[in-house]
Amino acid sequence: MKRILTVLAASTLTMTGIYAQQGQPYRTPAQKLVLTSEDSLNNNTAKNKTVISGYGSAFYQRDFNQHQATVSLDRLVLFVGHSFNEKISLFTELEVENAIIAGVNSDEPTSGRGSVAMEQAFLKFNLNARQYLVAGLFTPRIGITNENHLPVNFNGVERPIVEQLVIPTTWREIGVGLYGTLDRLPLNYSIAIMNGLNSANFHHDSGLGEGEGLGSNASANNLAITASAQYRISDFKFQLSGYMGGTVGLSKRSADSLNVGLQTGAFGTPLYLGEFDVQYAKNGFSAKALGTYIAYPDADRIYRAYAKSIGSGMYGAYLELAYDWLHTKGTPKQFITFARAEALDLNAQLPALQKQEDQLDGTLKQRHIIAGISYFPIPNVVIKADVRLAHTGEQNPALVINPPPNALPYKQNNQFLNIGFGYSF
Amino acid sequence: MQRRNFIRSSCNACLLLATGFLLPTLSGCGPGAYQVFNTDVKDDRLTIPVGTFAKGPLVLVRPKGWFYSIALRKKEDNTYTALLLKCTHQDNQLTTSPDGYSCSLHGSTYNKEGRVTKGPAERALKTYPVTIEADQLIIHTKA
């Protein structure tokens, strides 16, 4: 036994010595298949490789009106990517939200409030050095945060409220997209066709959010097209993006049976979204401004069909200013202070029928002021803290299901304290 | 009526798609922020005339058959750097920005020297040696 151990130890030392001489640690065959972001042994030119990376975030939030504090590991996302060759790659993002999902027979003390979902899963086909196609589940380029939603990419513990409620980040659908850059101009563009939204799931206080397909048995009777153009001039980056899609996934027979005149087909009962944003960055200063408007001309038909009081017009806009106080220090660290003002209204336009039936929800007209800090000890890790002051319109008593004293009286002003961290690798 | 709506919507969709495919042909509609130089790789070398930098310090070299460009930048001390515009996170093509280069896939950014300024990328861009022979810049792609 002692002899066997001696031989094993000698073999291990010999192997270690050989690889140490070559300047590389010993790796098993399985380890050699996997390239982590920390692994700089590969020289970035391999024909095929598998990459594991990801991002995550956690937060503490205190709601001062409710006298309630909450903590949660809100996102943990695992990327697995594989380059089959220089032309074809696979990208996947598997997301666990809020830490736990457990069945009723689980040993866990709680069933949790979490979810598991594929955030993206698509094949990428490089056409040349400037253009590529994607096919699968992906986040289209609409707004600033939807495409780049990692916590190191935005200031504030929470994503901008406008890009949660009006543009329902992370908005992903199944489709095919073309991405590219002009040959001699810094103009990036994208165009994609994908499955449309499901109006049967729209909800009056979450806009389009509940109607996303998310790659889960979404109807493909109705389709959508989205396109964007980005242009850089000096230190400014301008983006214009749009979306047009049918919102009724029913067959014509099913739609006709509802007897409200729902138009079916690829672009029946269409919804239109337009978005424009500008980003500026220079010498540590940065600014972002975004505006978006949604037009849904047939919102009254959705109300009559499903009793979902969705607005026929919704808008959102925000302006953010930020400064990195360590910009001149020559360090990768960043200490950013920022302030953001947001305005949105999901009931900006309501069809006459819903107005007659007293469906106008003043709480959907919101203003938010957020101010806080983002500290990056390295570019991949951020510690955040902010305060959000929220103001909404008046509550409509006709829409209150649980009036006081069963619920706390509604207050139009509220404050939130947020502390959190995020990482990406 | 339904058929008319379908045809109208389909035409709109086709127009949008056509716009996407035609956009690349619109190059040359305005002044570029960089020069573009298309070339072949010969003996693991890319040859670029020094005169290509007459209009600015950045030239995007597009080797024939490659899926990534090389950013060849002339520095203030008259030396040159050549960076492969391939994100070290998940190999996406990079685009130029005023401060360097950026990746649209997950938002990684790099400065003009190729160092990471924002994650998720962690490793600097691959660099190639550049030498000068007569009036030609040589990028050594084998290194």
Image (cartoon, helix red, strand yellow):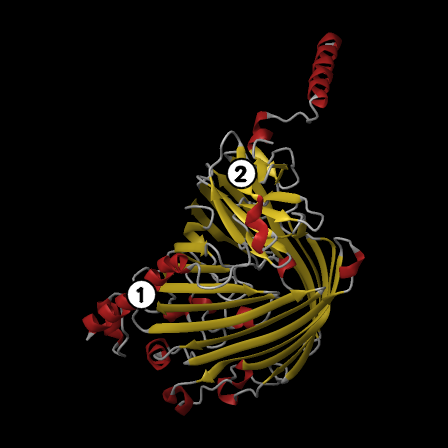
Q: Tell me where residue B109 appears, x and y as whole percent.
A: 62, 53
| Quarter of the figure with residue A161 | bottom right
User: Which numbered tag is attached to residue B47?
Assistant: 2
Most foreground residue, A145 or B108: B108
User: Residue B143, relative to residue A4: is it above or below?
Assistant: below
User: Residue A45, relative to residue A227: is it above or below?
Assistant: above
Q: Tell me where residue A31 appears, x and y as whole percent.
A: 60, 30
Residue under the point 63% across and 42% down: A37
Most foreground residue, A363 or A326: A326
Most foreground residue, A29 or A353: A29
| Quarter of the figure with residue A373 | bottom right
Q: Which residue is mark 1?
A: B15
User: Residue B138, relative to residue A70: is it above or below?
Assistant: above
Chain bearing mark 2: B
Circle 2 or circle 1, nearest the eye: 2
Q: Regarding mark 2 in the picture, which secondary structure is present there?
A: strand
Q: Amino acid at mark 1?
A: Leu
